[in-house]
Image (spheres, rainbow, N blue to C red):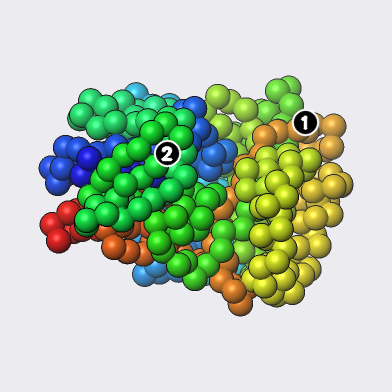
Amino acid sequence: MDVVVVGAGLVGLATARALLASGATDAVGVLEKEAAAARHQSTHNSGVLHAGLAYAPGSAKARLARDGIRRMVDFCRDRGVAHEVCGKLVVATEPDEVPRLEALADRGRANGLEGLRLLTPGEVREREPQVVCRAGLLVPEEGIVSFAGVADALVADIRARGGEVRSGARVVEAVREGGAWRVETTAGAVRARVVVTCAGLHADRVARLFGARPAVRILPFRGEYMRLKPARAHLVRHLVYPVARPGFPFLGVHLTRRTDGTVDAGPNAVLAFAREGYRRTDVAPADLLEAVTYPGLWRFVLRHRSMVAEELARSFGSGRFVDLLRRMVPALGAADLEPGGSGVRAQAVRPDGRLVDDFHWVDGPGAVHVLNAPSPAATASLAIGREVAARAARHLDG
């Protein structure tokens, strides 16, 4: 093969599709360790289409989310993938949040979002009758999507263009031989001129198999969701988000309607004891040891100790979780919720404890390594894939 992509998540699939569509090569294969594509971050998320509202202007996240959401909506329309551009409300529930909401609107405009509008409490109630707030921000371009449907459509596209998606093929060894790669997997060996690694929760480990020396470590943060009981799902029509707290590295607890009509509440964010630890009881000793012996983890905890304590408390007791929801939707109570799903976010962390706040990929000999692609990578995957594919094509030309 000319190019092998390691990892059949949305970013890996989009990269393979972009390579085939560009004409750079017609010999592309995707290797996936699971039995099917998109088994982890790509489908264990909120299913929200993010337009780039809160990201730093000029960042890769802002640029690629902006491009990516447009490409994703067009792709879903063309392929018949379930989605809805329903808009999102960000609401300020405390007086000190109103100026932050206004600043968020300014940031969104700087990032090229269209139709942003600050709303009065009455205007918010017209869209979400159960939401109580001091002010709201309408983000009309955002929406919801079935990312599982997107993954299926990408796999079909790759195969229709002559590419290969091979499941059950975990990479166990990689050797550079004569300007090419020999990649040993649990499903046999593959040779490729160029390799692209998009391994998500194992991004740093897989990059090291190909000789890279990442300056970051992947730490897994589990996001735990509750779900509104079916009889109470009518309380939320679309997407309702709080104003993000200053210095808080995650978005906070929000309410999101999915394409199947269910409404999720969450997530919180706690360190998982396994890179694929979707339950509190999931423990992988090697993963846990690697995390707790990494200085960056403890420096992160010290930098955000109040947030870490709050997230842990919320994970083991629903009271605080419900309180945060009731700030936005007072009609909600603990009896309205039932356990939902969970996801694990692959977050690259520097040794000094700072999170890598943007998408991050690096080049190596005959290789491109995607080392950090958290949210909004699912939304932006088609745009990310084009950019990573262009890097891989330069290796082919060289």
The residue singled out by tag 2 in the image is 185
Mark 1 residue type? Glu
Task: Give how far across and how far down residue 195 sits, in percent.
Answer: 31, 50
Position of 188 with respect to 280 (left or right) is left
Mark 2 residue type? Thr
Q: Contact (CB < 8 A) between labels 2 and 1?
A: no
Which quadrant is the C terminus positioned in? bottom left
Task: Give how far across and how far down residue 392 sits, in percent.
Answer: 24, 54
* Dot 2 or dot 1, earlier in sequence: 2
Position of 308 with respect to 41 (left or right) is right
The residue singled out by tag 1 in the image is 338
Position of 266 with respect to 82 (left or right) is right
Mark 1 neighbour density, 10 Å: few (under 14) some (14–19) many (20 or more) = some
- Image vertical order of residue 358 relative to residue 260, above or below: below
In-front residue for pair 101/123: 101
Determine if residue 6 is in view: yes
- Image vertical order of residue 124 relative to residue 296, above or below: above
